[in-house]
Amino acid sequence: MPDVQPLVSEFVLKLKRRKVEGSHAVARQTAELLRSVVSQHRMGSTNQAAALADAIRSVGEQLISANPIVGNIVRRVLHIIKEEDISSTAVGIEGLSVTVDSDDEYDSGNDDHPTLSAAVLASHARNALRAPSLQTLLDDIPVSTALSRSASSTGDSDGKTAGDKSLKTRKLKHDVIAAIGDLIEEIDTCYDQISEQAVELIHQNEVILTLGRSRTVKEFLYAAKEKKRSFRVFVAEGSPRYQGHVLAKELVEKGVQTTVITDSAIFAMISRVNMVIVGAHAIMANGGVIAPVGMNMVALAAQKHAVPFVVVAGSHKLCPLYPHNPEVLLNELKSPSDLLDFGEFSNCMNFSTQDGTPLLNVVNPTFDYVPPKLVSLFVTDTGGHSPSYMYRLISEYYSADDLVVQRKSTS
Amino acid sequence: MSQKKSRGGAAGAGDDAEDLSRSPLQAVLLADSFTLKFRPITLERPKVLLPLVNVPMIDYTLSWLETAGVEEVFVFCCAHAQQVKEHLEDAGWTGQPAAREMAVTAVESHDAISAGDALRVMYGRGVIHGDFILISGDTVSNMSLKDALQEHKDRRKKDPLAVMTMIIKHSKPSILTHQTRLGNDEIVMAIAPETKELLYYEDRADGSHLCVTIDKDILASNPTLQLHNNMEDCYIDICSPEVLSLFTDNFDYQHLRRHFVKGLLVDDIMGYKIYTHEICSSYAARIDNFRSYDAVSKDIIQRWTYPMVPDVLSFGNCHEVKLHRQGIYKASDVTLSHSAQIGANSVIGNATSIGEHCKISNSVIGAGCCIGKNVIIHGSYIWDNVIIEDGCKVSNSLVGDDVHLRAGAIVEPGCILSFKIKVGKNVVVPAYSKVSLLEKPSNEDSDEELEYADTNSGVTDSPPFSSMRSNAGRPAVPSKDDDLGASETGTSGVLGYIWASSDTGTQEDWRQSIAPIPKEKLQEMQHAVSVDDDNGSEEDLNNRQYEQDHDGDSEISVVEDDDYTKFEKEVEETFQRALDGIHEDNLILEINALRLSYSLQHADCAGAVFYSVMRSASVAAQSTNDNLLKTTADALAKWKDLLRNYTKTVDEEV
């Protein structure tokens, strides 16, 4: 644990400073960080799964306090640990054969400096993934040598029974690391899987409306274009950050008919639109969506004109929380300088002239909440789902007792 | 970690920019303001450690530097060096180098009494190798340095004499804004519009009126220049290593702006140049006095400094703060009575309890405070561990750590209560008073700009008691009135010295205090400005841009002289007649006669005639700027000969 602390605090700082933004980057980097936490975790002899989960929780707590949006990944990892624990006890001693491979993994994990590069980690993960094929090659290595090697490398045990335990420990850890590797891959490949469904949803000569810029939406539209669908896209610019301008540029480069409209023109244009496709920041357990600001307006306009409102998002954006608590809605107020130029309005911020109370206030929220009844369809990497099905999907990815990420000792 | 894939584009560009410089980007942070403006508080704690919205100022500066990609920071400590170092250690800035991308090193020197000395010490250390950022530890910013740095480097490649880039910020062109927002004086800068070179810099420290004297050479060598009075100096400078050696060469440079910048601008032998970089959307401001402390605090609460806002930026030992509606920031374990009313734009620190029927608005309350019932706090800054008993009233004041206000005490606007002050029952602390446990240094030398007292002589005595009656008048009375003898804490009085207002008199009090400017003063200022406006030149005050023609003679001289104005008027009348068709020779004769009767110089004549020419041109064309320029050029061409008559030498012709 102490080895990873610098790594964790560096990431926490990055999150705090909002240097890492965008749900994809955050999700990926969180998963990678947690993987290195796991790989450097020194396993005790008893109750490893709980200890590991505890370690993840303590890191997760720090991360969530820095920026709550990383909570999903932490919960996913906790769930992975639990599942692997269950499966490893079921499989029992048969899993031992993988140990030689995971031995390397473990050693390098321990020896490497905290600033382990992502590339090294990724290669390890790949090794781990290839384990089954290696296993056949290495099967005939006597178990005793593996045991002695591992005993000397960990240095915390020398009896045969202790060695046996450490083997089991590493088996668990190896599986967890491999599973986190899968998770990272899933985060990376969700775009492809989502956009595979593009052709089924976008039909010839349709008009699509989107707001702002989402990478998932972009890939989705690209995929439809590559399949020779001809369609038109209305891009609402997404004030105050105007990411829609960026999206419009990208779409035009790919040869998509694109029209840029202001956010306020959405209602006027919606009657000509066949389908609304937007990205999301998070999908709540009730099927509601946290999305960039202005999305609720789009959803309401779509409902009024009975236009399907489709949300595309990777499954890592599923969040097992319900939006009852206003804190869960995670709205973040950004700087007013997106809206106004400080210099031009500096005389309105003249605190000394009006009894110390500023007359001008600027509110610049980042997110909007779209209730589930306004969403027609979710397209995730596992296929299309209706909002009412979200809770079911979520229970596949998360275990119920991880909803509040907090160490048991503190609670 | 995974920047290669995910955010490769943005990060890669940043790396390239830094690779150009080869050497790591360094910064010199002056953890000492070398001024007395925050006295008496700074007698006990350095200014950079004073909490700004419950976070020490230096943490804002350091985290900004870290965000801006600075790799090495030298914190120059002078006054209270030990405290600064301890803080750096506690907050995790120094030590454990692996965790941070930025290395922070404290440099200590006790004999530096000015910014100039500090930089000379830095030069002596020989640790600065490349371009560095010069900043003081009381600056709050969220700007991105990338563009400014790039500009600076490109310029350096072309012209090695460009030693410094000053960051400036546009502010609303209003004469009052400087005063009302940041409490400092208006700055007039002349900037060459294309090159952004700074040609002239004047802060109105002397409070003189709208009179700008620009050297003729500046006008001669630059075809166009823009005069700005709508710029704020952010006091963030990107300097080349030459700056340090310049300070060493000119050992009389003390003040960064007053001596160094002006010195460089005047000195044309070395030919060093200073450039400016204007920031648009980002925020930068320096806390120079109590008024700017107030203004910057409110900007932070209003999130202009994002991500340097309380709920995002929490440091190691600070607790999590959550933003509620209407800009109310609350720490997690605040004890708040049901009937207490928290108004908009307030911050309440950790473990603070607030009693029944309290009204709190526009205020910042620190950690561990205990506030009784029926307390009214408005527009004030209450620091940590303050005890305020029932029925107190605090408005527009600053209350330091561990202050104890007993029941019914009233703190009037503009007060500064330093550390551990105890205010007795029902005592009224009069407006603009500064109270400290430490005695005001009597042998104050106004030349010395030290943040700290001479610790050997000032604090030797045990803290004496002075008392003040509740009906005491304005604090213009002597500072050390311990004639009433020792009054115990419980009785009606204030434990501590009341500092008399500084030498500059009561006028400064309202200028730089936290309290809003009184209505009558505002009106006075407004009036003064409007009067100045009338007297001033015809041009728009906000953004005066003088376009100088190829052979045009321009001289901006507003000389407050009765004789001269009379003379000018006469000349103008004569000139008007000339416009009606009098021959030029006669006109010259007439003006010469006038000159003799008022016993004035040729140059004055030139000035007056030029004024008249301009006047006629502006009368002819009042519509648009283009039109004005055209007619001016026409008029100048027409009356060129006349003017040449008076401007004999090339120098005068400018």
Image (cartoon, coloured by chain):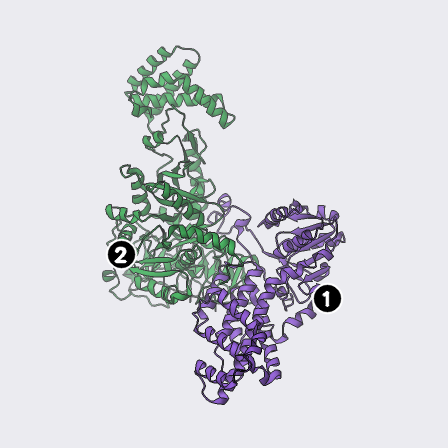
- The residue depicted at 32 percent of the width and 17 percent of the height is B645
* Residue A333 image-quadrant placement: bottom right
Q: Is B309 in front, or is B130?
A: B130
Instruction: Using a 10 Å C-alpha cutoff, classify the residue at mark 1 as few (fewer than 14 neighbours), some (14 to 19) or many (20 or more).
Output: some
Residue located farthest toward the right when viewing the structure as drawn: A306
Q: For mark 2, what is the residue?
A: B125
User: Which chain is painted in green?
Assistant: B
Residue A359: in sight, yes or no? no
Q: Is residue B182 visible?
A: yes
Q: Quadrant of the C terminus of chain A?
A: bottom right
Looking at the picture, how far across and down is residue A43, in whole percent?
49, 80
Of the pair A152 and A258, the residue shown nearer to us: A152
Q: Which residue is mark 1?
A: A388
> What shade does chain A have?
purple
Task: Have a look at marks 2 and 1 and say if they share a chain.
Answer: no
Is A314 rendered above or below residue B154? below
Q: What is the number of callouts on the image? A: 2
- Residue at 37% of width from left, 19% of height from top? B571
